[in-house]
Amino acid sequence: MAVSSNPVRLTQEDLESIIERALDEARARGASQAEVAVSQDTGLSVGVRLGEVETLEHQRDRSMGITVYFGQRKGSASTADFSPDAVRATVAKACSIARFTAEDACSGLADAALMSRAAQDLDLAHPWNLTADRAIEIAKSCEAAALKFDARINNSEGASLSTHQGLHMYGNTHGFVGGYPTTSHTLSCVVLAGTGEDMQRDYWYSSSRDWRELEQAEAIGRESARRTIARLGPRKLGTRRAPVLFAPEIARGLIGHFVAAIRGSSQYRQSSFLLNSLGQQVFPAGFSIAERPHIPKAMGSAPFDDEGVATRDRELVADGVLTGYILSSYSARKLGMQTTGNAGGAHNLLVAPNLTGGMDALLSRLGTGLLVTELMGQGVNMVTGDYSRGATGFWVENGSIQYPVAEITIAGSLREMLKGIAAVGDDVDARGGTRVGSILLQEMTIAGE
């Protein structure tokens, strides 16, 4: 099959033939192993502000990347041109690079026995046949609902709608070739309220594989406005120690720091505050995190990882004890372990709730302390676990929100923060690859006036 370099939409069979051609070329050039990833992505993004179109983008990307191995030497190259001559030239470049690299005993493909064998349809593709005009109409209705929610909403950073579909294929010299289509759709709105120095902004968004499951545009607009109005008239706090409750979208970031610390690369580079923590109590008793890669329609689902290794259900944390790292074949070899099917990252992490009743139950459990709804800055040291970030949110007394707070800093040690989790709510945010409810921490330092 001749594949031209013009941007027509290619089929899965087209991409497979490109992979096979590249692998054949690598073998012909003497490579002992090779792997190829091919992808094509198309998308539409629109942004409106104060009822006017600000951005309109049609996206069309394609790429082929090949990695070849000559024994323990490795070389990689990529191209956006799928023509036979370009594919041959890209393979030649990767082979040339490999001859100049140092040998690395841990390099090479993942073990052949671990390759994904059974085809799985995880229902990840729901293309939205959306015209630019209709996308603009939806974004405008989202922003309009926010602007008319309350007279104090007096400005906007806009509403954005994006829809993307991709086809990603991977193959290697073990004989594995696989791929699947995906889609993602997102609608968001950001508005402002207040005057002078008391200008506040907040946002809301909805994201899904299936466009039919997005929140209604008007509901997203109203929620962004409600959140913005709630932040008006913030006070400062005096420096103190108090319990801190992370809203779900903030709690996801906390789990993200934990995940970064147990990645294989952080472990073998010795750049983690959880170095050599396998089998240790990292969270309180009763706390658990499961990886579930095969949830239909979920953002983090995948039948196999970036090396073709079959993904599988497993427990990362059981009863507070760390039971597994997040490993690719390379990081696993560096640590003397076996890959966990996580080349490219984790797939749907589920943090089990231990408190029912949503935010109200968590506020009641918090009693008097701080509810955090936004974090700022990058004050996280992944080597030492030192944590210090700007925060905004609400001061809570006797389980009731009293007033918004701003211009404060929350600080602690990540290791102590993880061990000091007092409750996880059932108000789970399922919009990303980590599904978690609000997290209540026993105590942190709050630095204010």
Image (spheres, rainbow, N blue to C red):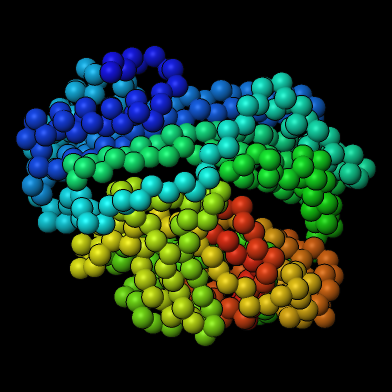
Q: Is residue 80 left or right of residue 175?
A: right
Q: Nearer the viewer, residue 431 or 408?
A: 431
- Residue 389 occupies quadrant: bottom right
Q: Position of residue 235 (x, y in %)?
A: 80, 64
Q: Is residue 222 left or right of residue 409?
A: right
Q: Quadrant of the C terminus?
A: bottom right
Q: Nearer the viewer, residue 417 or 343?
A: 343
Q: Residue at x 62, y 31 (%)?
A: 128
- Residue 79 occupies quadrant: top left
Q: Residue furthest bottom?
A: 285
- Residue 34 occupies quadrant: top left
Q: Position of residue 135 (x, y in %)?
A: 70, 27
Q: Residue at x 48, y 61 (%)?
A: 292
Q: Specify whether residue 326 is in view.
A: yes
Q: Is residue 258 left or right of residue 263?
A: right
Q: Is residue 256 left or right of residue 221?
A: left
How many numbered circles does the render carry? 0
Give the vertical position of 319 relative to 343 (above or below): below
Q: Nearer the viewer, residue 261 or 331?
A: 331
Q: Residue at x 21, y 42 (%)?
A: 175
Q: Quadrant of the N terminus?
A: top left
Q: Position of residue 214 (x, y in %)?
A: 69, 43
Q: Residue at x 58, y 61 (%)?
A: 435
Q: Position of residue 120 (x, y in %)?
A: 43, 49
Q: Residue furthest right?
A: 151
Q: Specify whether residue 190 is in view.
A: no
